[in-house]
Image (cartoon, grey):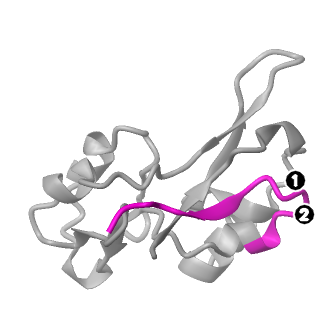
C-alpha cells in the first residue's frame, strides 16, 4: 500500500530543519533548505506555532493535471511521480497545487515537488513526521 507524508505532531517540532536539509541533500543534491519539498515555517509572532508546508498526497493531484508535458504523473495512492527530463519549466504545477507546497527553483528551472520518499521522516529527531498508509489504491 502506498504511503503519504503526514505532519501530525507539529507540537513536537523545534524547527531544527533536519527534515528540510535531508530532503534537499538526498533529492536535490543541495545543502540549501530552500530546495526542500518540505518547508517548516512559523505562523508569525513571538509565540507562534510552527507549521509544515507539505504535499497532501491528493488522490487526483491538480498539479499533475496542470502539467502539460507529463513531467508530473499521478502516483498510486496519492501524490505524484516527477520526471525532470520531461519538465518544460512552465510553472503551471506551482499555481495548481492546492496546498501551495510546490516551489520553483530558478537555477535548475525545475519545480521542487515532494515525491513521498520519506527521507524527511528518517531525519526528524522528534518524530514529528510520519509516512502513513494512504488508504487509496
Residue at the (87%, 53%) spot, across then down: 16
- Can residue 83 be seen from the camera position used here? yes
Above or below 48: residue 59: below
Numbered mark located on residue 16 in the image = 1
Judging depth in this view, the residue of 72 and 88 nearest the camera is 72
- Mark 2, residue position: 125
Q: Earlier in the sequence, mark 2 or mark 1?
A: 1
What residue is at 18 percent from the left and 68 percent from the top?
88
Instruction: Tell me if 101 is positioned left or right of 26 in this view.
Output: left
Provide the secondary structure element on which disc 2 rests: loop
CA distance separating discs 2 and 1:
9 Å
Q: Main secondary structure of the magenta part?
A: loop
Q: Position of residue 134 (x, y in %)?
A: 47, 61
Question: Which quadrant would residue 137 be assigned to in this image?
Answer: bottom left
Span highlighted in magenta in the image = 122-137
Q: Which residue ends up furthest to the front in the rendered image?
A: 135
Q: Is residue 117 left or right of residue 135?
A: right
- Residue 51 placement: quadrant: top right
Find out whether residue 68 is within the magenta segment. no
Q: Give percent across and percent down for residue 69.
A: 11, 70
The answer to if 128 sits in the magenta stretch is yes
Q: In the drawing, does residue 4 fall left or right of residue 22?
A: left
Q: Residue furthest left?
A: 68
The vertical placement of 9 against 3, above or below, is above
- The answer, for residue 91, to whether it is visible in the render is no
SS class of the residue under badge 1? Answer: loop
- Give the label, 2 or 1, closer to the camera: 2
Query: In the rendered structure, are the residues bearing label 2 and label 1 in contact, judged by CB atoms less than 8 Å apart?
Result: yes
Total marks placed: 2
Instruction: Judge the density around disc 1: few (<14), some (14-19), many (≥20) Cα neighbours within 10 Å.
Output: few
Amino acid at each position: 500500500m502506498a504511503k503519504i507524508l503526514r505532519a501530525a505532531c507539529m507540537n513536537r517540532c523545534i524547527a531544527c530543519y533536519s527534515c528540510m536539509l535531508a530532503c534537499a541533500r538526498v533529492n536535490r543534491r543541495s545543502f540549501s533548505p530552500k530546495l526542500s519539498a518540505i518547508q517548516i515555517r512559523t505562523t508569525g509572532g513571538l509565540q507562534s506555532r510552527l507549521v509544515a508546508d507539505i504535499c497532501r498526497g491528493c488522490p487526483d493531484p491538480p498539479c499533475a493535471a496542470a502539467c502539460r508535458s507529463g513531467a508530473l504523473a499521478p502516483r498510486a495512492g496519492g501524490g505524484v511521480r516527477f520526471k525532470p527530463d520531461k519538465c518544460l519549466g512552465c510553472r503551471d504545477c506551482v499555481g495548481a497545487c492546492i496546498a501551495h507546497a510546490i516551489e520553483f527553483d530558478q537555477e535548475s528551472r525545475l519545480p521542487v515537488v515532494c515525491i513521498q520518499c520519506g527521507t524527511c521522516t528518517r531525519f526528524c529527531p522528534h518524530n514529528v513526521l510520519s509516512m502513513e498508509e494512504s488508504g487509496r489504491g
